């Protein structure tokens, strides 16, 4: 069984000054601002979502995170654990969007990088 990854859905970047970063990505780079919530800001970049993750300290706990889309996050998580990989966070509901529920799960790759799985469950 394979995880059923279809594409990259989101890339997360840690930032130290969220308002400054929002201004840069919106006003300088011209990315379409989507929304801000819980010390995070989201932009559309040609169908790929960019998430800016604000930190309150000068030392973010990680670098960029790539979020891979999958139609069935439960099956993807099961496939990954069948390969002996432990999940950092099991599939869980993150947010209710206008046309779907957003679910995520997290794991570490072979090099210790945090990897996200995301699934947009349509209503």
Image: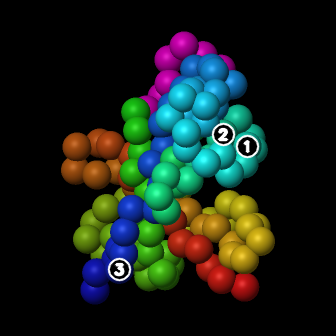
| Disc number lying in front (2 or 3) | 2
Residue 122 among those drawn in magenta: no
Residue 112, numbered circle? none
Asked whether the residues under the numbered discs 2 and 3 touch, taking CB atoms below 8 Å apart as contact, a structural biologist would say no
Residue at label 2?
40
Question: Could you tell me residue 41's position as x and y percent?
Answer: 65, 41
Nearer to us in this view, 46 or 98: 46
Question: Could you tell me residue 27's position as x and y percent?
Answer: 61, 31
Say which label, 2 or 3, has the lower sequence index. 3
- Give the structural element (helix, strand or loop) at label 2: strand
Nearer to us in this view, 69 or 117: 69
Residue sitting at x 59%, y 74%: 120
Say which label, 3 or 1, has the lower sequence index. 3
Residue sitting at x 49%, y 52%: 45
Q: Which residues are magenta?
A: 56-62
Asked whether the residues under the numbered discs 1 and 2 touch, taking CB atoms below 8 Å apart as contact, a structural biologist would say yes
Nearer to us in this view, 52 or 78: 52
Residue sitting at x 63%, y 21%: 20
Residue at label 3?
4
Residue at label 1?
36
């Amino acid at each position: 069984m394979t995880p059923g990854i279809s594409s990259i859905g989101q890339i997360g970047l840690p930032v130290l000054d969220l308002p400054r970063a929002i201004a840069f990505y919106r006003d300088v780079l011209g990315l379409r601002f989507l929304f801000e919530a819980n010390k995070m800001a989201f932009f559309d970049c040609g169908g790929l979502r960019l998430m800016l993750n604000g930190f309150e300290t000068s030392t973010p706990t990680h670098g960029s995170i790539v979020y891979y889309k999958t139609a069935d996050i439960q099956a993807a998580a099961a496939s990954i654990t069948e390969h002996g990989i432990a999940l950092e966070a099991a599939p869980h509901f993150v947010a209710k969007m206008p046309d779907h529920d957003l679910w995520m799960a997290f794991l570490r790759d072979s090099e210790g990088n945090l990897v996200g799985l995301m699934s947009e469950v349509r209503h």
